[in-house]
Amino acid sequence: MSTEHHNTGQPDDQPPTNADVAFESSDIDTRTILSYLLYLALSVAAAFIVSVFIFNFTSKMAANSDTPMAPVHQGVAPTMPPEPMLQGIPGHTTDPQLDMRDKREKDEAANEKLDWINKPGGIAQIPVDEAMKIIVSKGLPSVPAPAEKKK
């Protein structure tokens, strides 16, 4: 790149001018943009101030409308909510995963249990595998057709 100065033929090194061509001095109006930014900042600050007043007002209104604690409960440490409580909250004595494992073990034991439910009625509980074999060999019992409604 050349570092020598070129003579433009204009006095006082002014940029070239042409009577038929007009150039913009700038593509953007910085004053307008800065004024918009100022108005935006003022609007955000005003909205923040209004929201602080609204928050303080609603907090006072909630505190005034709140019923006071019963004298019996004043000075007493917070107590646990009544049962049934959700598992996993502080103060709950059992572990949810342990409870789930115990439930699965009980369900599996019940599925493998062989016992009478109603001996005089002939109702027995048998393991699931045995029940499936019986159904395969004998088939499902037939269901009687529903009785027709009389008009």
Image: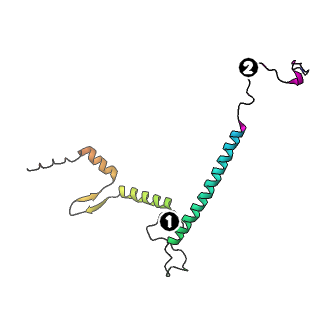
- Residue 83 x, y percent position in the rendering: 44, 69
The kind of secondary structure element at disc 1 is loop
Magenta segment's dominant SS is loop
Provide the residue designation for mark 1.
Answer: 94
Number of residues whose C-alpha sits closer than 10 Å to that of mark 2, classed few (under 14), some (14–19) or many (20 or more): few
Q: Is residue 139 above or below residue 95?
A: above
Position of 111 with respect to 31 (left or right) is left
Position of 62 with respect to 122 (left or right) is right
- Residue 133 x, y percent position in the rendering: 30, 47
The kind of secondary structure element at disc 2 is loop
Residue for point 26% across, 44% down: 137
Position of 129 with respect to 14 (left or right) is left
Residue for point 43% across, 67% down: 84
Q: How many marks?
A: 2
Provide the residue designation for mark 2.
Answer: 21
Position of 50 with respect to 138 (left or right) is right
- Residue 142 x, y percent position in the rendering: 19, 47
Q: Which residues are magenta?
A: 6-30
Q: Is residue 102 above or below residue 151?
A: below
Q: Amino acid at mark 2?
A: Val
* Mark in the foreground, 1 or 2: 2
Towards the viewer: 43 or 99: 43
The reply to whether the magenta stretch includes residue 77 is no
